[in-house]
Image: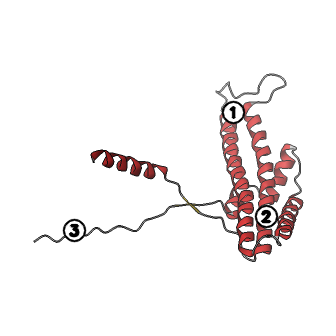
Amino acid sequence: MAKPATNRQSPRVVQLRKGATIEMVRLTCPDATQAMRIAESYGTAVVDSDGIRDLHERLIIETAESLSDGLGERAMQIHLQRIVGAFVGSAHGAGQFYSRAVTEARDATAKAANDARDEDLVGPVGYDSAAQRKREFAADMGVQAHALRMAAEGAVAAYSQVVGEAWRPFDRPVDNPGQALDRKAAEAQLAALG
């Protein structure tokens, strides 16, 4: 004798979109020592790392102080979480872009070292080679990524001071519009059947 089928639903698994962390920023963006080496090697601007960090830390703290009368503790935490998340996300994006620029510069430099290639040799008078331009671009991106890292580190430090706990990114559920669309299509097909 057959057992009646039980309609058991499996628990719904919600995937989370992981936000960038300050550790991810530190892995992708140059630190102060590397930024100084870049500035010295390429003649770019020397960034005031501590000044950027301190300014952004004060900015977040002063923002929180000015909002303290109008926001409750939880509202302040949510607001600052979003602001700090923007700083961290921006720095992480710049760090990833910098990493790609370095890879392209290394590839172009390796190609230029091959004596049998004509296209990567020094350009016409007054123009740098493609490999040199890519190295200089990567250097500029490194300095920018470092500056944004310092801004993010200042914002994270301020969050910790204001809220009293370490900042963590908000992990939001992954939007999956395909499932909702499939479900709507199935409902329309069933409705057509009567």
Using the image as rendered, state which of residue 187 and residue 81 is in the foreground: 187
Which residue position holds label 2?
A: 155
Which residue position holds label 1?
A: 112
Q: Amino acid at mark 3?
A: Ala
Dot 2: few (<14), some (14–19), or many (≥20) neighbours within 10 Å?
many
Q: Earlier in the sequence, mark 2 or mark 3?
A: 3
Kindly identify which numbered label has been placed on residue 5: 3
Give the spatial CA distance, label 2 vs label 1. Answer: 42 Å
What is the secondary structure assignment of the residue under circle 3? loop
Q: Earlier in the sequence, mark 2 or mark 1?
A: 1
Q: Is residue 85 left or right of residue 189?
A: right
Where 19 sits versus 106, above or below?
below
Give the spatial CA distance, label 2 vs label 3. Answer: 56 Å
Q: Nearer the viewer, mark 3 or mark 1?
A: 3
Dots 2 and 1: beta carbons under 8 Å? no
Where 129 sits versus 95, above or below?
above
Taking the view exactly as shown, the residue that stands out farthest to the top is: 124
From the top left corner, tell me how far across and down residue 5 is, in percent: 22, 68
Q: Is residue 20 left or right of residue 37?
A: left
Q: Amino acid at mark 1?
A: Ala
From the top left corner, tell me how far across and down residue 137 is, in percent: 76, 40
Q: Is residue 179 left or right of residue 61?
A: left
